[in-house]
Amino acid sequence: MEDVQRLIKSRAGHRGNITTLINSIKNFLGTFDDSKRSELIGLRVVLTERYSKLQELDELIFNTLVDDEATTQDRLELEARSSSEIAVRVQTKLCRSQEVLDQLEERRSPSRDVDVRSSSSFSERARGMQARVKLR
């Protein structure tokens, strides 16, 4: 059980760091402009890496508790619930930050949509294709 306590302390540190990263991204998104794109990508990478480590710790703790006969069902449910809560917060922030990056990318890239109604060359090509189809 001593190992579990050590893992729980380590996890608390990781959760604190993840909460700080989530808050940083939240604040960052509130004042986001195009020049901060690289910083946002960096924050997302760090959050993803830290969350991966947290998941490993959660799994180790949960498996250790499952193997311990003294662990109650309530304790296991608490562990699962707290892991899920942080997972939702992380995934929500990752999704929201990706949406912002996608919107930025849409604004940066030229439109690829073609208005076929106003394109005379398109109309000419279409008539030519119709002519070839009628000949066959």
Image (cartoon, helix red, strand yellow):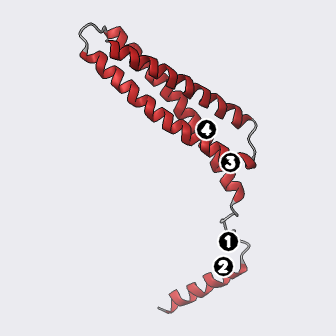
Residue 59 vs residue 99, the one in the foreground: 59
Image quadrant occupied by the N terminus: top left
Spatial distance from mark 4 to mark 3, Cα to Cα?
14 Å
Spatial distance from mark 2 to mark 3, Cα to Cα?
37 Å
Secondary structure of the residue carrying tag 1 is loop
Quadrant hosting residue 99: top right
Give the number of the disc on residue 37.
3
Nearer the N terminus, badge 4 or badge 1? 4
Q: Report the amino acid beneath label 4.
A: Arg
Secondary structure of the residue carrying tag 4 is helix
Q: Report the amino acid beneath label 1.
A: Val
Answer few, some or many: residues within 10 Å of disc 1's Cα (few below 14, many 20 plus, some between 14 and 19). Answer: few
Are the residues at dot 2 and dot 3 in contact (C-beta closer than 8 Å)? Answer: no
Quadrant hosting residue 18: top right
Secondary structure of the residue carrying tag 3 is helix
Q: Report the amino acid beneath label 3.
A: Arg
Nearer the N terminus, badge 2 or badge 1? 1
Q: Which residue is mark 1?
A: 116
Q: Nearer the viewer, mark 4 or mark 1?
A: 4
Are the residues at dot 2 and dot 1 in contact (C-beta closer than 8 Å)? Answer: yes
The location of residue 92, given as percent across then percent down, is: 56, 33
Q: Which residue is mark 2?
A: 122
Q: Which residue is mark 4?
A: 96
Spatial distance from mark 2 to mark 1, Cα to Cα?
6 Å
Give the number of the disc on residue 67.
none
Quick check: 74 left or right of 86?
Answer: left
Nearer the N terminus, badge 4 or badge 2? 4
Q: Report the amino acid beneath label 2.
A: Phe
Q: Nearer the viewer, mark 4 or mark 2?
A: 4
Q: Residue furthest bottom?
A: 135
